[in-house]
Image: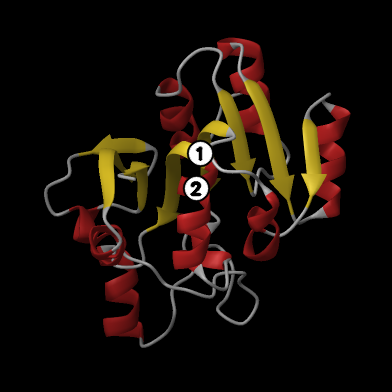
Amino acid sequence: MTLRPDLAIIASHVNRGARILDVGCGDGALMAALRDQHGCDARGLELDPVNVAAAVGQGLSVIQGDADTDLADYPDDSFDYAILSQTLQTTRRPDWVLEQLLRIGRHAFVSFPNFAHWRVRASLLFGGRMPVTRLLPIAWYATPNIHHVTVDDFRALVKERGIAIEGAWFLSGDQQTGSGMANLLAEHAVFLLRHDR
């Protein structure tokens, strides 16, 4: 099974044998790859019961839960990596969720669609409507996205909170692109973070 490009970036930067918590793990595709190819101890938290059942059906350790409320139940430093892929923008308090990820894990991977990408800007400017794209395929009234985060917004948040960026990768389509003008040119961003405690 081929991983989504942001998940492939995450998988390629996780240490072998690491303890992982994948928050919003979906059907467990990343967890299965980390378990099978990297020997990781991967656990998951997922809101959708259909995805929980699919992940458990693969022999993965996944529980049904909500990132907005259930992360507080995990002890400090219980994982090497906490992962939040394409989920930050769906949470009620992204800042709180980010703090919890870095409390639970020594490092955190966060990936999200960049709402400042030029195609999104052009759709608003020329069409006057919220865009529907390959990475944002659902109309505004049905989307789970409740916060429209950009690369620059995210960088400002982590700087404000004293969170160190250990790595950053940017995607245009399914290909990696440079960090120059990422706020305009990247459709998707992946950050590796560390909290300086």
Q: Residue at (43%, 48%) from the top-left corner?
A: 111
Q: x and y percent of residue 59 in the render? A: 84, 24
Mark 1, secondary structure of its residue: strand
Amino acid type, callout 2: Arg
Query: Which residue occupies the foreground of this view, 45 or 160?
Result: 160
Note whether residue 133 is visible.
yes
Q: x and y percent of residue 181 in the render? A: 13, 54
Note whether residue 135 is visible.
no
Q: Which mark is residue 105?
A: 1
Residue highlighted by disc 2: 103
Q: Residue at (35%, 84%) from the top-left corner?
A: 127
Q: Is residue 195 above or below residue 10?
A: below
Left or right: 47 as drawn, with respect to 129:
right
Amino acid type, callout 1: Gly
Query: Which residue occupies the foreground of this view, 66 or 136?
Result: 66
Do the CB atoms of the residues marked 2 and 1 lie less than 8 Å apart?
Answer: yes
Q: Is residue 158 above or below residue 123?
A: above
Residue furthest to the bottom in view is 128
